Each structure stands twice: as C-alpha cells, then as structure tokens.
Image (tube, grey):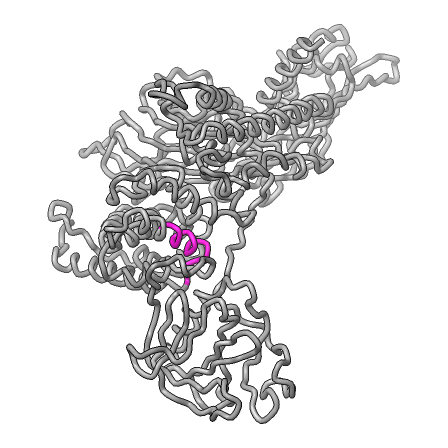
C-alpha cells in the first residue's frame, strides 16, 4: 500500500488469474524407467500459494489447471517450480520460471512458453533490510583527520522461511581492494521479520602511523571510492551443511561523499554464483497464461455513475443492451467478466434478476433443447461463479466428510483392467466404487433443504425459461438444472476438491483417479429420473409468482396428526390424522390422499416453522406452523426424523417470505396463557428467537467498490472493442441487410438501446480514468524512493518514476 493511501481515499489490490497449461521436454530421470512424477507450484517470491495435481510417469505433463486469487501483499517475483515427487526422500526441484512483477504485463492474458531455469540457493532471495549509514571525520590528538563509518542494521522484513523455520542474523562487511573486515549481529529466533537495531563501527581511513598490514594512510582517501559495505542475511541452521544464505546488499561508499548520513530500505539481492554457464533448454519448458492487474480503489462515490448503469442491467430491455452483457461481449474470456459481475451483483442483492435475464435471453436463442446451457457463455460462467461463492458451505456439509474418508482410507477403485495394480481384484474395486458412488449420490439427493436460497432462485428461473421455450420436451426443465448442479457444481468439486476448499492440496494420484471415476459417474446419474425429486426441490422458490407455474412442484407428502386450529368459534380443538401435502405453492391437508383439501396455507403465509415443546400436549415430535394473525397449526410427525424433515423443508420453501417472524412461543397457548412465558394475551409477541432453520441469504465478504473498479479496468482495457461496438450500432449494416464481418461477433438486438448504454459506459470510464491519472500524479509527488513501501532496488517503481518523469516533461 502506498504512502498516499493513508488518507483513506483509495486502496491498492492485486489480482492474478493463472492458467497452468503443460510442461514439455523435462530431463529424464536417472534410472531405468526415465519417467518422472511431476507437479507444479505457484509462488509469491518463496511462498507457495498453489499446487497442481501430480502427473505420473511423464516428461511432458499436462496440468490444465486455473488458479484465481487476490494477492494480499507486495511481491517481487511470481515464480513457478516444477517438482519431481520422491516417495522416500524430499521432492526434488527440476527447474523454475520466475517472472518479475514489472514484467507481468508483457505476458498478460496470452499463452506463453517459458524456459525452465536452474534453481540454486544463492538466487532464491526475498525480503528487505532497513539500514542507516553515517560517515564521519574524527580528529586525533595529533590533529590528524581520519574517517569512520557507522553502520546501523535496524530490521528486516519478509525474509524467506527455510525448512519451516527462520533464525536470521546479519553480517556486515567493509571491503576494499586490500582489506575486508566483518562483524555479525545476534541471531533472532523464530522470526522472518527480525528487529536487530545494532550499530557497527569501521575505520575507513587511518593515520599514517597506524602500522597494521591492512592500514590505509591518510593519502589513500581516494581508495574510499573503491570500497563497499556489504550486508548478508543468513539463517542460523543446525544442519551439517552450514547456515543458509537469505540475501545480500552491496553499497559503494562513494555515494556517502554527497551526504554523510543516509537511511533507507533496500531489497535484498541474490549472490553472484560465478556466472555459471547453463544451457537454457536443458530443463524443458512450461506453458503459462498469466492475467495480472493492480487496482487502486477509490471511495464509493467515485463509482456511482458506472455502478448505477451496471446494476440496472437486469431491467434493460433487451438485456443484450445492458452494461453487464456488453462487458461479456467485449472481454476476451467470459470468465474475466463473470468474476467481478457476480461479486458486484451478489453484494447488492441483484444476482438473481440479472442471471434470470441473461439466461432467458440465451434460452430464446437456443434451438436444440439438448444443447441448453452447454456452452461457455456469460450465463454459464456467471452461474458457475455464483455457485462457487454461494455454495461453498453447501459443499462442505454435503461432500467433505466422504471426500475426507476417500482421501484417508485409499480403497482401490480402479475398474480399467489395464491399470490394475498387483494384488488388486477387479470385482472388489467395482464394489468399492459402487459404494462410494451410492453414498455420494444419496447424500447429494437428500441435501436439497441445504441448497442456498440464491442457487434455488436461479435454478427456478432456469427451469421456467427452459420449460416455456421447449414446451414439447418434458425433461428440459430437469436437464436445465442438472447441467449446473451436477455437471458444473458437484462433479467438479469431487474431481478437484482442493479448488473448492474441500482439501488443502491435490489428492495423491490413486485418490485422484478414484475421484475422477466417481465424478464421471455422478454426472451420468444426475440426468436420471431418480434425481428428479431433488431437482424439483432445489428449483422451487418462495420469491416467485406461483401462478406463473403451470404445474405445482410436489415436495413432500404423508400422514401426520394435527390439532384443530379453532377456526370455528365453538369447535373442538381435538387431534385428527390427516394427509399432508407440500408443494412450492401451498401446504394443505385432507382426510385421505387424493381428497379435496380441508385446509390450504399459501407458502407466503408461513411466517415461521418451529418445534413445539413436549409438555404442551404431552406428545413427542410436534412442531408448529405459524401464520398471520397469530394462528398456529400444531402437527405431530410419526417420528423425530420425519419431524425434522418436515421442519427443514417447510422452512426452506418459506424462508424468503417478507413477513417472517423473528420471535415465537416454544409452547402452546392453553387455558388462557402461554405455557412458556405465562403471558395471558394470545397475541403477545413471541418470547424466544426463531431458529431460522437455514440461512436465507449467503453473507459474503465482498467489496462492491473494488468489484466496480475491476469492471472499470476491464472496460478501459477493452475500450477499442467498445468503440467498435459503437460503430456497429451506428452502422446501417446493423439495421439493414447482412452484417459486416468485423461486427458479426457482437450480439446487438437493439442498436439504439445498446448505443445509449455504450455512451454511458464510455463516459463513466473516462471520468474514472481522469481520477486515476490525478492519483498517479499525486503519488509521484509524495512517494519517497527508499521508503519502506518502495525500497531501493524496486525496479517496478523505478520504471514508474521514469514514466512519470517523461509524462511530466511532455506536459511541460
């Protein structure tokens, strides 16, 4: 974060999206089979932040993995290490690719092959050191002048952790053509941010009477220009190989001639390794696609114009003329647009209407029901991102226990005879696999009540759009939902559990193979009829106009015992067995299955569903359905499991009702008072907070201003495409006759509306661009080179300084 940011006007964020493709031509293993088991790590300097799966027995491993993160700190290098797994010893490093931060823009969003470089300890450095140097003249008793240097080592920050520990110390050396004098700080235990604050004194020039071999006569003052002070950082190690080198700093003393005292922060540098000549292609190469951005986020009012036009996207007719849809059109990859759009709309509670609008438009353009939502469209990417954000807890409670078991137990599940290991039995493996699949499929199809509301609302919209578009296909309403919940949510989470925070790292190869087989089977089972009741439940919604649905969705039914609600003034409040039926329209009961309903409670009239204390009627497994005007329906289920099922599913379908209660009475109103709180009025507000059952909304840590800034950056990056789209709207070819080839990539259903939106976008982006330019000018004036935020050796800042100097000179 820069010095100028302390005014709370803006914040600096770093984002990175990485696509790890493949490696090729890795060196052969020095053994009989010559193959390697390789994985790749992503590192910020020396800190590992991501690890790929292990690809076994290959010298050209294919990874095909994406990694997206917000980078929480400054860094100097984005590094990629290829490791060869060793079962018996520490995994060995084959080579690395290190990209300096200032060079990342050269490779922005394009596939690039990088040559792997050798890794040696002397080049693996990170961190910075804070020094104060003071050169002073001292007059001796005889009147002779000599020079002394005081070197103060104050502190270091961000040193690498070596083998799980860091016990750093520093050596300070004054070196010249004919002398070398070294001193050492104390060791600081268990910290990579040590505070030393130690001062070392060196005699730079001495009187001529000084007679040691390394003396400097007073006439040797010019020799000072050839001297340097060197600071080396070390990790104190108990290993027999000695202490590990952490980095060094070399400063010529001649710069102190201009100022006798100098204090600054410095980046540590690698040590000279003797310029060993190594062929760059000895180690193979790695294909990467890196998208890196830095966003300076201003206060909220700066983003109002652009944010407002984005949030209105769901209401624009047609939706293809909206700002959000336009962003998807101009971005190179739909994923680029989907990530900030989804986060912005989730933050402001507009994700469901937005996705409903773009999904409905996509369905209208779809000709074949078998291809519905199968492409990588903006709709698909937005739903994927929403499920990943909103469904993380859902995955944890649904899949994590079984995934953990699979990773720990290591049951063989290989069903390919060619891949069977010695001692494995094909039939046993099939049975192991069948059991895992059955358990996972069962836990998924019974998890409908846990599905987040926002996902249910989206699935409801997909279901309705698909059913309306393809009225002759009765299955399309299911395939529209299963294509996401099974194919793009549960199956990918099973296949790569580390990407969904179900495991910390990629599973080992055998477990990974087991998860692959399970994932493929779950994809197939998701389209079968046995999953329809689950799909019905998760695609029901309490937020919609129920009359818009042709056929109500049956969610649950069965016999239970109910107590009369006392609708008649003199009626008996006795208990009777009734057939209960729940759809996403209403909750009803009748004498027997198929009879006309005796009572119907619209879903929107269910204000709370809670357990009822046993002492109320001396009956177990009772719950209450609370309605307007404090009317309560008391129900007894057949057992505790069934009671919980009914409570969960009733809560699920009603949890979005606007008038849901926050308090309730856990006991009944009998004999003129509430048994729980003894209040006498039957309309007394509840005395106990409602449990709420399941959360109605997903609470996410999202900064709306940051997401708007990210969207601004994308619009700014793709400004030529925005201008080309404007031309397309103004071109006669858009209105009449065939489109010109250069415009054919854009979806423009209404040129006039699209043009209006484009104009607003370009104006908003232009205003923000001016604010960023002013921010950079202010930053240039206030930032000090050599400060803690911009240590000496920061090449990216030096480049920035040079650019700003050129801009300033040009302006003058």
Tell me which corner region of the image, top left, top right, bottom left or bottom right, holds residue 140: top right
Whether the magenta-drawn stretch holds residue 769 is answered as no
Please, which residue is most extreme toward the front here?
736
Residue drawn at the location 36% of the way across and 82% of the way down: 560
Work out whether 212 lies above or below 323: above
Rendering coords of residue 538 (x, y %):
37, 59
Q: How would you classify the magenta stretch by its main secondary structure?
A: helix
Residue drawn at the location 36% of the way across and 33% of the way down: 20
Q: Looking at the figure, which quarter contains the N terminus?
A: top right
Work out whether 331 lies above or below 704: above
Whether the magenta-drawn stretch holds residue 461 is answered as yes
Segment tinted magenta in the rendering: 450-462
| Residue nearest the observer in this picture, 135 or 803 | 803
Work out whether 560 lies above or below 132: below
Work out whether 467 lies above or below 118: below
Q: In the rendered picture of this protein, how many numbered marks are placed on residues?
A: 0
Whether residue 125 is visible, yes or no, is no
Position of 149 with respect to 95 (left or right) is right
Tell me which corner region of the image, top left, top right, bottom left or bottom right, holds residue 152: top right
Tell me which corner region of the image, top left, top right, bottom left or bottom right, holds residue 661: bottom right
Residue drawn at the location 26% of the way across and 48% of the way down: 516
Position of 699 with respect to 355 (left or right) is right
Rendering coords of residue 618 (x, y %):
47, 92
Whether residue 563 is visible, yes or no, is yes
Rendering coords of residue 614 (x, y %):
48, 87
| Residue nearest the observer in this picture, 445 or 481 | 481
Rendering coords of residue 594 (x, y %):
28, 77
């Amino acid at each position: 974060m820069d010095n100028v940011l302390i005014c709370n006007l803006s914040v600096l964020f770093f984002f990175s999206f990485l696509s790890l493709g493949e490696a090729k031509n890795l060196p052969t293993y020095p053994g009989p089979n010559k193959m390697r088991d390789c994985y790749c790590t992503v590192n910020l300097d020396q800190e590992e932040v991501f690890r790929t799966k292990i690809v076994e027995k290959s010298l050209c491993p294919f990874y095909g993995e994406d990694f997206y993160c917000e980078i929480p700190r400054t860094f100097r290098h984005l590094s990629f290490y290829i490791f060869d797994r060793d079962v018996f010893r520490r995994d060995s490093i084959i080579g690395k690719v290190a990209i300096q931060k200032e060079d990342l823009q050269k490779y922005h969003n394009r596939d690039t092959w990088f040559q792997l470089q050798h890794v040696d300890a002397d080049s693996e450095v990170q961190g910075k050191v804070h020094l104060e140097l003071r050169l002073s003249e001292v007059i001796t008793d005889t009147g002779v002048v000599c020079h002394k240097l005081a070197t103060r080592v104050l502190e270091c920050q961000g040193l690498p952790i070596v083998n799980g520990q860091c016990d750093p110390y520093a050596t300070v050396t004054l070196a010249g053509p004919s002398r070398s004098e070294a001193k050492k700080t104390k060791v600081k235990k268990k910290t990579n941010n040590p505070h030393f604050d130690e001062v070392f004194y060196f005699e730079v020039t001495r009187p001529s009477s000084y007679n040691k071999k390394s003396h400097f006569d007073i006439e040797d003052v010019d020799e000072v220009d050839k001297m340097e002070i060197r600071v080396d950082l070390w990790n104190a190690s108990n290993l027999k190989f000695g202490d590990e080198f952490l980095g060094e700093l070399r400063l010529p003393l001649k710069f102190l001639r201009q100022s006798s005292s100098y204090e600054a922060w410095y980046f540590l540098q690698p040590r000279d390794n003797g310029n060993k000549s190594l062929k760059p292609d000895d180690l193979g190469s790695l294909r990467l696609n890196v998208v890196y951005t830095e966003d300076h986020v201003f206060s909220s009012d700066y983003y109002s114009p652009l944010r407002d036009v984005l949030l209105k996207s769901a209401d624009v007719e047609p939706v293809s003329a909206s700002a959000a849809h336009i962003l998807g059109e101009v971005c190179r990859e739909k994923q680029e647009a989907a990530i900030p759009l989804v986060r912005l709309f989730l933050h402001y509670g507009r994700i469901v209407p937005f996705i409903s609008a773009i999904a409905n438009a996509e369905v209208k353009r779809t000709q074949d029901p078998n291809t519905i939502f199968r492409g990588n469209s903006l709709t698909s990417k937005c739903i994927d991102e929403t499920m990943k954000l909103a469904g993380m807890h859902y995955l944890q409670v649904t899949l994590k226990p079984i995934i953990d078991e699979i990773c720990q137990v290591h049951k063989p599940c290989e069903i390919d005879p060619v891949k069977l290991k010695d001692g494995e039995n094909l039939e046993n493996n099939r049975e192991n696999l069948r059991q895992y699949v059955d358990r996972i499929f069962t836990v998924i199809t019974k998890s409908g009540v846990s599905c987040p509301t926002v996902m249910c609302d989206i699935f409801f919209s997909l279901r309705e759009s698909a059913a309306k578009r393809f009225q002759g296909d009765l299955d399309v309403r299911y395939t529209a939902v299963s294509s996401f919940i099974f194919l793009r949510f549960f199956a990918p989470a099973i296949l790569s559990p580390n990407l969904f925070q179900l495991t910390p790292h990629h599973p080992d190869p055998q477990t990974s193979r087991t998860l692959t087989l399970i994932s493929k089977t779950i994809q197939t089972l998701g389209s079968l009829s046995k999953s329809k009741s689950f799909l019905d439940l998760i695609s029901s919604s309490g937020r919609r106009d129920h009359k818009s649905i042709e056929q109500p969705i049956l969610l649950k039914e069965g016999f239970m015992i109910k107590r009369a609600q006392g609708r008649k003034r003199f009626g008996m409040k006795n208990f009777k067995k009734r057939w209960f039926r729940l759809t996403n329209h209403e909750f009803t009961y009748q004498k027997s299955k198929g009879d006309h309903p005796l009572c119907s409670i619209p879903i929107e009239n269910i204000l709370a569903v809670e357990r009822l204390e046993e002492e109320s009627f001396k009956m177990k497994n009772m719950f209450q359905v609370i309605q307007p005007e404090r009317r309560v329906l008391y129900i007894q289920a057949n057992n505790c499991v069934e009671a919980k099922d009914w409570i969960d599913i009733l809560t699920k379908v009603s949890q979005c009702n606007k008038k849901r209660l926050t308090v309730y009475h856990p006991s009944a109103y009998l004999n003129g008072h509430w048994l729980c709180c003894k209040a006498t009025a039957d309309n007394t507000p509840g005395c106990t907070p409602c449990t709420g059952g399941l959360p109605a909304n997903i609470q996410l840590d999202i900064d709306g201003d940051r997401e708007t800034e990210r969207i601004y950056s994308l619009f700014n990056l793709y400004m030529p495409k925005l201008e080309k789209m404007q031309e397309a709207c103004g071109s006669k070819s858009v209105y009449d006759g065939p489109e010109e080839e250069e415009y054919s990539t854009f979806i423009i259903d209404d040129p006039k509306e699209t043009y209006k939106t484009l104009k607003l976008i370009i104006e908003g982006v232009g205003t923000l661009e001016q604010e960023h330019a002013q921010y950079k000018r202010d930053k240039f004036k206030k930032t000090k080179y050599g400060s803690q935020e911009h240590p000496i050796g920061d090449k990216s800042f030096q480049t920035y300084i040079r650019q700003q100097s050129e801009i300033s000179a040009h302006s003058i």
